[in-house]
Image (cartoon, rainbow, N blue to C red):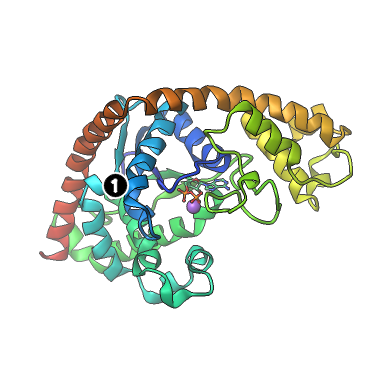
């Protein structure tokens, strides 16, 4: 019933890292061959925590540059920033009224990001998942490539779609939309490196906000920085096992093997077939080679694009115009269905 369409987004909150690349951007690029895709710089999500206005604009351009440098084609697909299509915020309000407090209260990302001082978190940080549901459903997108950390938010998106379809079933049918207006969107979380861990601590995910620069490889790091960070990455004293089972209780080793597999489009089993029995010093040297080979061209192209901000702004403006047409069509229908 629903045409297959891919939507996903990345926040312009600085420090784009290898986890964002392997968990999201690299998958975005792959989806272009088989699907119509909409890729969004989610700047309204970014301001759920304080952003310096002087930095935010540069960061919006940097995420856009990363999309383009990684190989997303803004002519064939849509690349834009969220704040320029006001239907996202409009639909999010409707979803705030569909979602239940209990559902939002269960979101673990809010608990992590708000930390102990929950009274001082923004209301927007709490309402974030409803805006995310609106981002996806304003295009009635059927598939969302994301990292593991977004799984719970995608489940909430499906719950919201389902409740909207149920609550307004009669009105949806009366307006000629059959028995469901919103699709139940599928998360696409598969393969190695759906959750890239910190290089300093195998129990924490690699994150933009980690205060240690050695915890993550930034997409803008040069070859020396990549080499240093991988050499300093935390490991244990044992050589690599020859079977994937042998990684189970070794989170740091498991992480480096998963990163190697994702960067070379192979599997952890393939990597261990080649490197099983190796000491970390040797394996890390091999990992530096594949990481530099994969990431350096992306970093170089990002630098080239960032030197011409006018071009990036033009890509975003054109993408926003195209996205707005689609989003307005959904929002018009939602208003009819709700009774506005
Ligand atoms: P962050 O979590 O670093 O603030 P975003 O929320 O903007 O980044 O997430 C952008 C995309 O990157 C999402 O699809 C998210 O699932 C993915 N992502 C973020 N961190 C990781 C990670 N450590 N491993 C795999 N994917 C990740
Ligand atoms: Na995230």
Q: Quadrant of the C terminus?
A: bottom left
When asked about the image quadrant of residue 172, the answer is: bottom left
The residue at the far left in this view is: 340
Residue 289 in sight from this viewpoint: yes
Residue drawn at 42 percent across, 74 percent down: 120
Residue 265 coordinates in the image, percent (x, y):
62, 28
Q: Residue at x 29, y 54 (%)?
A: 182
Respond yes or no on whether mark 1 lies under 8 Å from ligand 1.
no
Examine the image and state in which quarter residue 37 appears: top left
Residue at the far front: name it: 54
Residue 26 location (% of width, % of height):
51, 33
Count of numbered badges drawn on the protein? 1
Percent of width and height locating residue 180 = 28, 55
308 with respect to 248 (left or right): left
Viewport quadrant of the N terminus: top left
Taking the spot 40% from the left edge, 60% from the top edge, the residue there is: 49
- Residue 6, can we see it? no
Image position, residue 211 (x, y; %):
58, 53
Vertical relation: 243 (above or below) 166: above
Question: Residue at label 1?
Answer: 82
The image quarter in which residue 275 lies: top right
Query: Quick one: SS at disc 1?
Result: helix
What residue sits 31% from the left and 29% below the top? 309
10 relative to 137 in the view: left or right: right
Question: Which is nearer the eye, 304 or 243?
Answer: 304
Task: From this view, report whether residue 222 is shown above or below residue 171.
Answer: above
- Front residue of this view, candidates 69 and 329: 69
């Amino acid at each position: 019933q629903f045409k297959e369409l891919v939507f996903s987004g990345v926040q312009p909150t600085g420090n784009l890292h290898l986890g964002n690349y392997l968990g999201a951007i690299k998958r975005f690029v792959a989806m272009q061959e088989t699907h119509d895709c909409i890729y969004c710089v989610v700047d309204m999500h970014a301001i759920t925590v304080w952003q310096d206005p002087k930095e935010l604009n540069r960061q919006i351009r940097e995420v856009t540059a990363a999309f383009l440098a990684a190989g997303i084609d803004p002519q064939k697909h849509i690349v834009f920033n969220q704040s320029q299509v006001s239907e996202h915020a409009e639909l999010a309000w409707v979803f705030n009224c569909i979602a239940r407090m209990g559902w939002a209260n269960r979101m673990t990302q809010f608990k992590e990001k708000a930390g102990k001082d929950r009274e001082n978190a923004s209301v927007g940080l709490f309402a974030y998942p409803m805006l995310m549901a609106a981002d996806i459903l304003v295009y009635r997108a059927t598939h969302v490539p994301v990292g593991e950390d977004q799984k719970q938010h995608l489940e909430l998106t499906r719950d919201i779609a389902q409740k909207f379809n149920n609550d307004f079933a009669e009105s949806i049918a009366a307006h000629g939309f059959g028995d469901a207006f919103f699709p139940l969107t599928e998360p696409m979380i598969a393969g190695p490196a759906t959750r890239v861990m910190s290089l300093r601590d195998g129990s924490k995910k690699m994150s933009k906000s980690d205060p240690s620069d050695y915890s993550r490889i930034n997409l803008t790091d040069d070859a020396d920085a990549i080499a240093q960070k991988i050499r300093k990455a935390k490991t244990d004293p044992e050589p690599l096992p020859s079977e994937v089972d042998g990684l189970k209780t070794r989170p740091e080793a498991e992480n480096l093997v998963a990163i190697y597999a994702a960067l070379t489009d192979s599997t952890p089993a393939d990597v261990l077939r080649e490197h099983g029995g190796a000491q970390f010093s040797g394996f890390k040297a091999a990992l530096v080679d594949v990481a530099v080979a994969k990431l350096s061209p992306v970093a170089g192209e990002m630098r080239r694009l960032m030197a011409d901000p006018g071009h990036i702004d033009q890509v975003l403006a054109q993408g926003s115009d195209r996205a707005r047409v689609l989003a307005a069509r959904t929002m018009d229908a939602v208003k009819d269905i709700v009774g506005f």
